[in-house]
Amino acid sequence: MNYGLQISASGALASIHQQDALTNNLANINTVGFKSILTGTMQRLPARIEGNLPYLSSGSLLEKLGGGVFAAPTRIDFAQGILESTGNELDVAINGDGFFVVGDASNPALTRDGRFTLNRDSELVMTTNGVPILSTSNKTITIDPSQGNLTISSDGTIYQNGAAINQIQISDVPDRSILTKIGSGMFASKYGAALSLIEGTGSLSQYTVEGSTVSEIQALMSIQSASKAAQGNIGMIDMQNKLMERAINVFGRIA
């Protein structure tokens, strides 16, 4: 394969990958608890060096050009979003570090989406998907709505008629780089293993939710930049195709 084509193609693919991730960010600008994806590129070494094949012949000038670029592993931006008031007593936001623990107690997921509701069994669940919220004892939380209004304190304790009935678990992980998105605003280990949880340090705020961390202006500018980079690399591919065609049809005929 033509070396110039290879470098241009790698740049185009990396830019298109960035564009896809950034477009997903923009689509979730109003999604509660959404954490944006951070993208980037990495310099690729020449094939002979990357593959540790020193015995292969190569041009020193070409190797100085490198092997193009490829998409760097995406990362999740866990910065806190703005807390927004909703007036709903089952809406809760975390101010600070930590996550709500949801799902299966033996292998729970984490989320920052604090829009809760009660299912038909009066269990506290996520509004978006019905996944149960876990208490500090790793059990589902049951609330009888007929017993009066709820108050949720900053440490997650749920009070009804002045009496504490349960406590929402707020946990974190020692290394957030192991977390991956699994849909519906939830996170789990990218390795599939059960998460090792530690106590979260954040405090809860009732009647509020956490907004998305996506900045509309920044997302639009990043998408535009990635699009221009992709178009530039595709333009280079087209130019090199024309040069090869000319070399074959013109210079080859003269020879």
Image: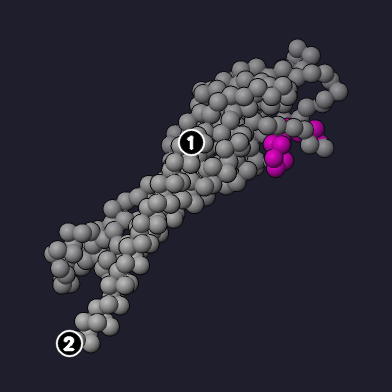
Quadrant of the image containing the C terminus? bottom left
Which image quarter: residue 89? top right
Above or below residue 167? Residue 216 is: below
Secondary element under disc 2, as helix, strand or loop, is loop
Depth check: give the residue in front, 107 or 72.
72
Q: Are marks 1 and 2 in contact (CB under 8 Å)?
A: no
**Whole-percent x, y for residue 133 in the image:** 67, 34
In this picture, residue 118 sits left or right of residue 126: right
Bounds of the magenta span? Answer: 121-130
Magenta region, main secondary structure: loop
**Whole-percent x, y for residue 103 in the image:** 65, 41
- Residue 217 image label: 1
- Residue 131 image label: none
In magenta segment, residue 180: no
Q: Earlier in the sequence, mark 1 or mark 2?
A: 1
In magenta segment, residue 126: yes
In this picture, residue 4 sits left or right of residue 206: left
- Residue 255 image label: 2
Q: Residue at x 43, y 52 (%)?
A: 227
